[in-house]
Amino acid sequence: MEGDQTSQVQTQALGPAPVTVRPARFTPLDSPPGSKPQGLAGNDLGILLDVPVRVTVELGRAELPVREVLELGTGSVIELDRSAGEALDILVNGVVIAQGEVVVVGEQFGIRLLEILSSPGRYA
């Protein structure tokens, strides 16, 4: 069967007729030099500009046994794993992309970006 890529598969004697099996053929993923991928103008990310993402600011974390969580009440203080004044993590869809600090804007809180992390510095 080396020269022929089509083979016959026999099923049970009382079952359906033989089935023809052929290898799958896929269109190459790489484009010819100088051509642009369909739907994208080179590296234009404009089609993604209106996609919503979840932005989260993390002050810190704490690990508590269930007993301590059940004892929490109004006025309880949970010690976080960060010092006061330390930069906060800014996450987009669960991935840390930047560090920042809390600011007050009018009567609301905001975040001032201090550093945008490079791809290797990002972590989930």
Image: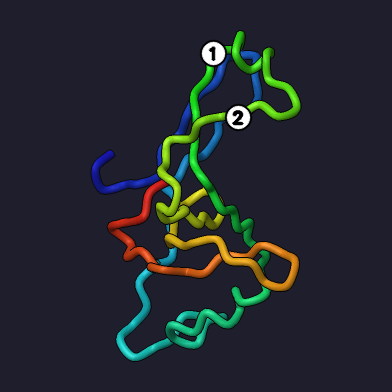
| Marks 1 and 2, the one that precedes in the sequence | 1
Residue at 55 percent of width and 61 percent of height: 102
- In terms of image quadrants, where is residue 103? bottom right
Determine which of the numbered discs, if any, sits on residue 77 in the image. 2
Question: Which residue occupies the foreground of this view, 76 or 53?
Answer: 76
Residue 57, horizontal then vertical, whole percent: 56, 53
Position of the C terminus, as image quadrant, is top left
Residue identifier under label 1: 65
Question: Which residue occupies the foreground of this view, 110 or 19?
Answer: 110
What kind of element bears circle 2?
loop
Left or right of 94 in this view: 87: left
Of circles 1 and 2, the one toward us is 2
Q: Is residue 63 above or below residue 82?
A: above
Residue at 63 percent of width and 17 percent of height: 69
Which residue occupies the extreme front position in the image? 75
Residue 59, horizontal then vertical, whole percent: 52, 46
Circle 1: residue type:
Pro
Q: Residues within 10 Å of mark 2 (few under 14, many from 20)?
A: few
Circle 2: residue type:
Val
Determine which of the numbered discs, if any, sits on residue 5 in the image. none
Residue 86, horizontal then vertical, whole percent: 40, 52
Question: Which residue occupies the foreground of this view, 53 or 39?
Answer: 53
What kind of element bears circle 1?
loop
Marks 1/2: CA–CA distance: 15 Å
Residue 94, horizontal then vertical, whole percent: 53, 48
